[in-house]
Image: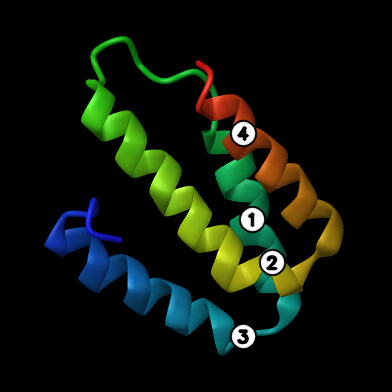
Amino acid sequence: MILFESRWICSGVFSLKRIKSMPPEVWAVKLADRITNLQPQPPHWNKERKIKYREEARLILSELKGGNEFLARRLEGKIGEYGRI
């Protein structure tokens, strides 16, 4: 979590807390959203930005994996692939 900018920590953690107060179907939407977003990074992203984005995905997975087991496994795989891009 040290890698996150303070701006993201505040808004991202708040967003995850808000999502966790909703039905698991909402959690699944967030998991699916991050799966879709873990495509090859824009060429202008530096290594630090890529690492931050992967760490954000790990946080989302750790907080919301109970929302949908299939999507959690899929996101976990995408995070692994993302590290190799």
Which is more foreground, mark 1 or mark 4? 4
User: Which residue is labeled 4 in the image?
Assistant: 80
CB under 8 Å between discs 2 and 1: yes
The residue lying toward the viewer, choosing from 3 and 44, is 3
> Mark 2 and mark 1: span between their CA atoms?
8 Å
Q: Is the residue 84 above or below the residue 34 in the image? A: above
* Kind of residue sitting beneath label 1: Leu
> Mark 3 and mark 2: span between their CA atoms?
14 Å
Which is more foreground, mark 3 or mark 1? 1
* Kind of residue sitting beneath label 4: Gly
Which is more foreground, mark 4 or mark 3? 4
Q: Secondary structure at mark 4?
A: helix
Q: Residues within 10 Å of mark 2 (few under 14, many from 20)?
A: many
Q: Quadrant of residue 82?
A: top right
* Kind of residue sitting beneath label 3: Met
Q: Residues within 10 Å of mark 1 (few under 14, many from 20)?
A: many
Disc assigned to residue 31: 1
Sooner in the amino-acid sequence: mark 2 or mark 1:
1
Sooner in the amino-acid sequence: mark 3 or mark 2:
3
User: Which residue is labeled 3 in the image?
Assistant: 22
Counting from the top left corner in percent of width and height, residue 30 is at 59, 59
User: Which residue is labeled 2 in the image?
Assistant: 65
Counting from the top left corner in percent of width and height, residue 14 is at 34, 78
Sooner in the amino-acid sequence: mark 4 or mark 3:
3
Q: Residues within 10 Å of mark 3 (few under 14, many from 20)?
A: few
Compared across the picture, whether 6 is left or right of 33 comes to: left
The residue at the point 30 percent across, 61 percent down is 1
> Mark 2 and mark 4: span between their CA atoms?
16 Å
> Mark 3 and mark 1: span between their CA atoms?
14 Å
The residue at the point 56 percent across, 72 percent down is 63
Sooner in the amino-acid sequence: mark 2 or mark 4:
2
